[in-house]
Amino acid sequence: MYTAQGTINREDLLEQHLPNVRRQALALQVKLPSGIDLDDLIQAGTVGLLDALQRFDPNAGASFSTFASQRIRGAMIDELRSRDWLPRSVRRNARAVEQHLLRLEQRLGRSANEREIAEEIGMSLEEYRQLLSDTNNGHLLPFEELVAESGEPEAGSGGPMSPFAALVDGEQRERLVAAIDALPEREKLLMGLYYQEELNLKEIGAVLGVTESRVCQLHSQAVKRLRASLVGSD
């Protein structure tokens, strides 16, 4: 993909990698709430591809394909993070759950079950589960938000990683792996299926024998446990 002058032919690279934008958008969309428009993801990913064309340094040691894939996915995730679906009251309640959960599990010395958590925060079990559903629908890719401080990938940053691998890469690796290992078995299995095996909600529900909405609740609860654990270990 070089011109006669030995420079990168950006138009050819753009045309070659545009299908990758759609593939990544489709792969991401199946893991998101139904209201997320595919075209929005494709548009964001295209911006990421154009950014990769501008930033790519062929002397940095990474292939353009690797670098572009990272930029495309990063642009899509940035687009999702920029949206604000949740009312302030729901966000406030979600933060309160994490604080109560941290105190409760420190007191119990084990993972609390849903009924114990609901009682701790003064909600019925049904109200607590609804809050889990609400916050899961608003906080997309919460695991990746946990490592948002990792920054953008650079051209020499190596090969592409799965969301799970990206999650556990960096300063918080040991703490996060320990927190995941301490999750209740069903939530730990769910996280592995979602982030490592990259199954969608319907597929995870089939494995666990629950509905998709229940998968969302369990996913949200697992993320809250992890956030509480990481805050508590600071």
Image: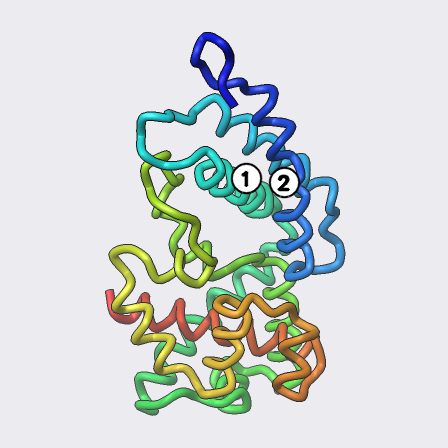
**Is there CB contact under 8 Å for labels 2 and 1?**
yes
Tell me the distance, in whole angstroms, between the alpha carbons under discs 2 and 1: 7 Å
The answer to whether 203 appears left or right of 229 in the picture is right
Quadrant (top left, top right, bottom left, bottom right) of the C terminus: bottom left
Q: Amino acid at mark 1?
A: Ile
In percent of width and height, residue 148 lies at 41, 49
Kindly identify the residue that appears in the image at 54 percent across and 46 percent down: 77
| Secondary element at image label 1 | helix
Q: Amino acid at mark 2?
A: Val
Q: Which mark is residue 108?
A: none
Q: Which mark is residue 72?
A: 1
Work out whether 98 lies above or below 146.
Answer: below
Asked whether 21 or 78 is in front, the reply is 21
Work out whether 233 lies above or below 81.
Answer: below
In percent of width and height, residue 84 lies at 61, 48
Labels 2 and 1: the sequence-earlier one? 2
Asked whether 127 or 23 is in front, the reply is 23
Identify the image quadrant of residue 134: bottom right
Kindly identify the residue that appears in the image at 61 percent across and 86 percent down: 208
Q: Which residue is mark 2?
A: 21
